[in-house]
Image: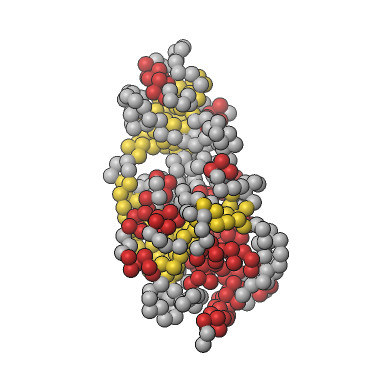
Amino acid sequence: MSEVNRRDLLAGAAAFAGFATVGLLPGTAAAATRQRPGALRPPSLGVGDKAVVARVDARRALRHLKVLSDEIGWRVAGTRGEHRAARYIAEELRDLGYEVELQPFPVADKYLAEIDARGERPWQSSASPQGAVGSVDGRVVDLGPVTEVTGDVRGRLVLFDRVAGKETDQAKAAAGAGAAAALIANVRSPTYPERKATSFVPVLTEPVAIPVLGLAEYHGERIRAGARRLSFEVTAYTGLTSHNVLAERKATLPNPEGKAVIVSAHYDTVPGSPGANDDGSGTVLCLELARVLRRLPTQQAVRICLWGAEEYGLIGARHYVKQLDDAGVKRITGCFQNDMVATSSPPAGTYWLLSVDGANNTTTAAVNAAAVRLGYVDQTKGPTARGSSDHEAFHERGIAAGNFSWRGGEAPSQLEPVYHTPEDRIVQNLSLERLQVSLELIGCAAYDVARRK
C-alpha cells in the first residue's frame, strides 16, 4: 500500500472515530464542513481534519482557563500558584488517560508582595531584594515622579512614579523620611508607548530598611482612582522548584522508531499577571487538544508538554531538551509551541508562524497547509524569524519547532497593550473565536504530522 493510501485509510478511521466519539450530535457533521470562524474561504478538509474539527471546542478549553487565570491567578515560577497549576494540569491529563510525569528543576529566588487593596481584587507585585520583608499596612501618599520626599510621610506608604535609574534615590528618600514602604509605579517605555507598564523588580544599589515594591502601571492607576489604603506582605521565596508537566499517549499503530509529535505551551506567568492569554490560552489549547487527540489513531506518539519557568528565561523547556540524549532528539518529529493564542486585541488579526531562523520546517509547513485546508487565506503569516519562546530550545538541538501566536506583528512593540500586566484577564483580553481558530489550526496540523510514518 502506498504512503498516500495508507494515510487516507488512517485518516478515514480517524474521522469515523471522531464522529462516533461526539455521538453524531445534531450539526456535528455540518460543523466539520461549514466555513470556519473568521475564514475568508470555505474549507476543503481532509477526513483527518474533520475528525479534529468535529470535536475541538474553545468553550470547553475556557473552563480550564477560568481555573488557571481566575481561580489560581498568578503562577510565578516555583511558587505556590505555579505548583497548584501544575497539579491541576497533571490531574486533567491523567484523567484523559495520558501517562504523566512532573519533571522538577530549580529556579531562582524571588521577592514578591501580596497586596490587599480594599474593594479591589488582590494584587501581586515584585519587591526589591535589597528592601525589607514583612507585613505593612497604611495609607498611601502620592508624590509622583520625584526623587526627594518633602512633608510628613511618617508611617505612610509613599507612591512614586518610576524615574528610571533613580529607584535607589526614591527608596532611600522614603526610608529617610520615615515612610513605612516605597511603592514605585512603573511607567511606559518611550520605545513601546502603546504597551502598559508591568510590575518590575526594583534593583537598588544599597539596602534600605523598608519594603520597596515595583508596581505595574495598573496598580498606580487604581491607587489614584481611590485605593488609597493598602496592606501587603513581602515574602522572600527561596529554594524554589518548578516543574514541567509531561504527558504522553502512545501511538495506536506500529511505531518502531518511537517517533513523537509535541504540542506544548508554558503555564507560568510574570508577577502580578493572571496570564489569561500569556500563556493560559496556550495551556488550555494543549489540554483541549489532548482530549481531542487521545483516541484518534496515530502512527506516532502524542506528547503534551507544559513548561514551567518560561518567563524567567525559557528554563523549563531548556531543562527538558537538555535531558534528551541524541536518540531522544531524533524521535521528536516536531514541536508545536503555542504562546498567546487568544488575544482580543483588535490589531492582533494575524496568526503568526515563527521559527527561530525564519526557515520553514515540519511544524510551520503543517500549520500553513492546515490554514489552506481550513480556508484561512492570507490570514496567516510566516514562517518569520523570531525566538523568545520555548521553541528556541528545540531549534538549538536541531528539532523542527515553531511558535504560533496571534499578534499585530512579530516585533515586541506589536504585542497586545496589556501584555504581562494585571489586565491580562479573561474578561479583558480573550477572544473565543481566535482560540477556536488556534485550536483548529494546531489540531489539524499536529494530527497530520502524528499520522505520518
Colour mode of the rendering: secondary structure
Does the image show residue 82?
A: no
Q: Residue at coordinates 71% horizontally, 67% vertically from top-left?
A: 42
Q: Quadrant of residue 154?
A: top left
In the image, taking residue 433 as reference, residue 85 lies left or right, namely left
Q: Residue at coordinates 35% horizontally, 47% vertically from top-left?
A: 78
Which percent across, then down, holds residue 328? Answer: 34, 67
Which percent across, then down, holds residue 140? Answer: 48, 23
In front of the other: 436 or 135: 436
Which percent across, then down, holds residue 19? Answer: 59, 77
Q: In this view, which residue lies farthest toward the left?
A: 239
Is 444 rendered above or below residue 82?
A: below
Which percent across, then down, holds residue 146? Answer: 48, 18
In front of the other: 364 or 273: 364
In the image, taking residue 406 as reference, residue 148 lies left or right, namely left
Is 408 rendered above or below residue 29?
A: above
Q: Residue at coordinates 52% horizontally, 35% vertically from top-left?
A: 197
Does the image show residue 303?
A: yes
In front of the other: 268 or 335: 335
Is 420 rendered above or below residue 103?
A: above
Q: In this view, which residue lies farthest toward the top?
A: 151
Q: Residue at coordinates 55% horizontally, 45% vertically from top-left?
A: 411
